[in-house]
Amino acid sequence: MDQIRPSAKRRVVPASDTLHEAIENAKRPVQPLSVPSERKQVSELARIDRQLHLADLGLNQYQLKLEKGLTMEPEEQRLFLAHQDSIRKLEMARAALVAKSDLSKKSDLEIAKSMLAKGLEREHILTIFSGNTSVEEGL
């Protein structure tokens, strides 16, 4: 029979030594954690981009199910559609913020055309720019 040989020498430590070390460690002062008192301020556009990124990650579970050809339960379908609606609203808010920051650089018609190019419906754009005849004629 083969004998089992330990790969390293074992050290016998009396329990009183380990208990003494634990007591000494407990007596040492604990360094307080340094928590910043102020949070880093993030712009609205950066927050919306972060929310959109997280929302896209949330759609992955539905995407996998749909790509496999599986059907969703009615409650799951409701959540999926609500999720997509939230993403559309975030995209509209993002487009509005970008348009607001570019107002001095672009005309209303240029902004409306870029919103149309990004997939916003024509009726929504006309509602946003209601009363602006240049947008109504240009689209």
Image (cartoon, rainbow, N blue to C red):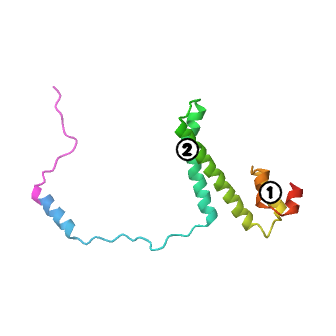
Q: Which residue position holds label 2?
A: 79
Q: Residues within 10 Å of mark 1 (few under 14, many from 20)?
A: some
**Dot 1 amino acid type:** Leu
Work out which quarter of the rendered image holds the N terminus and state it: top left
Towards the viewer: 66 or 57? 66
The amino acid type found where label 2 is placed reads Leu
Q: Quadrant of residue 92?
A: bottom right
Q: CA distance from mark 2 to mark 1?
A: 29 Å
6 versus 101 height, above or below = above
What range is drawn magenta here?
1-16
Name of the residue lying farthest toward the top: 1
> How many badges with numbers are in the image?
2
Residue 2: which numbered mark, if any?
Answer: none
Front in this rendered view, residue 73 or 4: 73
Could you tell me which residue is drawn at 75 percent across and 54 percent down? 124
> Does label 2 or label 1 sit earlier along the sequence?
2
Residue 6, magenta (yes or no): yes
x and y percentages locating residue 75 in the rendered image: 52, 39
Q: Residue at x 71, y 61 (%)?
A: 96
Left or right, 57 with respect to 117, comes to left
| View extreme (bottom): residue | 37
- Quadrant the C terminus occupies: bottom right
* Residue 76 horizontal/vertical position (percent): 53, 39
Residue located 57% across and 42% down the image: 78
Where on the picture, by quarter, is residue 15?
bottom left
Left or right: 35, with 65 as reference point: left
Q: Which residue is mark 1?
A: 126
Magenta stretch contains residue 70: no
Number of other residues with Cα within 10 Å of mark 2, as a class: few under 14, some 14 to 19, many 20 or more = few
Most common secondary structure along the magenta stretch: loop
Marks 2/1 in contact by CB < 8 Å: the verdict is no
**Secondary structure found at label 2:** helix
